[in-house]
Image: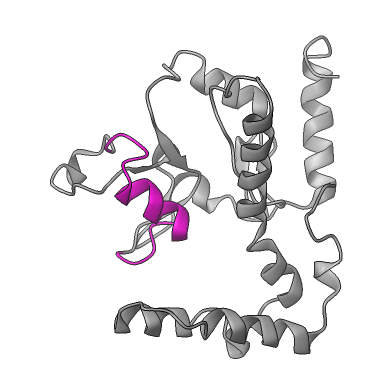
Amino acid sequence: LDDLDPDCQNITWDRVQAVSKFCRNRPNHLSSIFRHLRGQYARSEWLKKKQNPSGWLCAQVRPFSGLMKAYSHYARSSEGLPDYFLIFDDDTYYNMELFRRSFESTDPSEAKVYAGCLVRLPIHQDWVLGYFVNHYNVSTHVSNFFYNDVAHARLESYKGSEIYKTATGFCTNDNKCDNNTEICHRAKPEWMKEEVMQWKLKFPDKYY
């Protein structure tokens, strides 16, 4: 509704390719391995496999845009920071009533960052967000004892939802989700509306 570039999804395939090339070939002082990895980002051969290449490319900037909007809001106002900050794709559904129940007994002053579906690969760790969380001490160390000796393991998978060899937890909720689920990725807008309305009817005094 307040997209920084609402017309982005209408860009042509030629423009998609141009943006991809620009992002992969910017001059920098990165190491050779990082230059190689960035050179593989959003290549034309990979983008062509996407159902909506322009939509996917446009979506990549939205988390940063959302963070900057939130930062600008709190920097200009005297409003205090919220206890929790949620970042989602626009096709991800999160049941806020179940969120409230899950976190009502936790201490919001404890710095903790969760990934709704964490991809555990050495160079992935949920992309740039994982890099900042793990290496800039944004969050406390993960609770999984398996990573006790990994100093930069700070991005926690939400309720065991991660992808390593196989998908577990909410990582299996992709496109086709059951009613009353907590998180659903790639959810259809119609399904989201129906699910929200169902929960509104359950708690008419709380959600309206």
Quarter location, residue 50: bottom right
Q: Is residue 165 above or below residue 54?
A: above
The answer to whether 206 appears left or right of 50 in the picture is right
Q: Is residue 79 above or below residue 92?
A: above
Q: Residue 63, how many percent across, how many down?
A: 62, 52
Given the current orientation, which residue lies at the most extreme left position?
Answer: 149
The answer to whether 204 appears left or right of 57 in the picture is right
How many callouts does the rendering have? 0
Q: Is residue 53 above or below residue 154?
A: below
Name which residue lies at 82% across and 9% down: 205
Residue 176 appears in the rendering: yes
Given the current orientation, which residue lies at the most extreme front position?
Answer: 76
> What's the colour scheme?
one colour
Q: Which residues are magenta?
A: 122-141
Name which residue lies at 68% across and 31% down: 76
The answer to whether 139 appears left or right of 54 in the picture is left
Name which residue lies at 57% across and 24% down: 81
Q: Nearer the viewer, residue 135 or 160?
A: 135
Inspect the magenta stretch and tell me whether residue 191 lies in it.
no
- Quadrant containing the C terminus is top right
Q: Nearer the viewer, residue 73 or 118?
A: 73
Q: Residue 183, how many percent across, how many down?
A: 60, 40
Residue 51 appears in the rendering: no
Q: Residue 49, how many percent across, how many down?
A: 65, 82
Q: Is residue 162 above or below residue 156?
A: below
Quarter location, residue 33: bottom left
Q: Residue 18, how many percent across, how many down?
A: 69, 87
Name which residue lies at 41% across and 19% down: 109
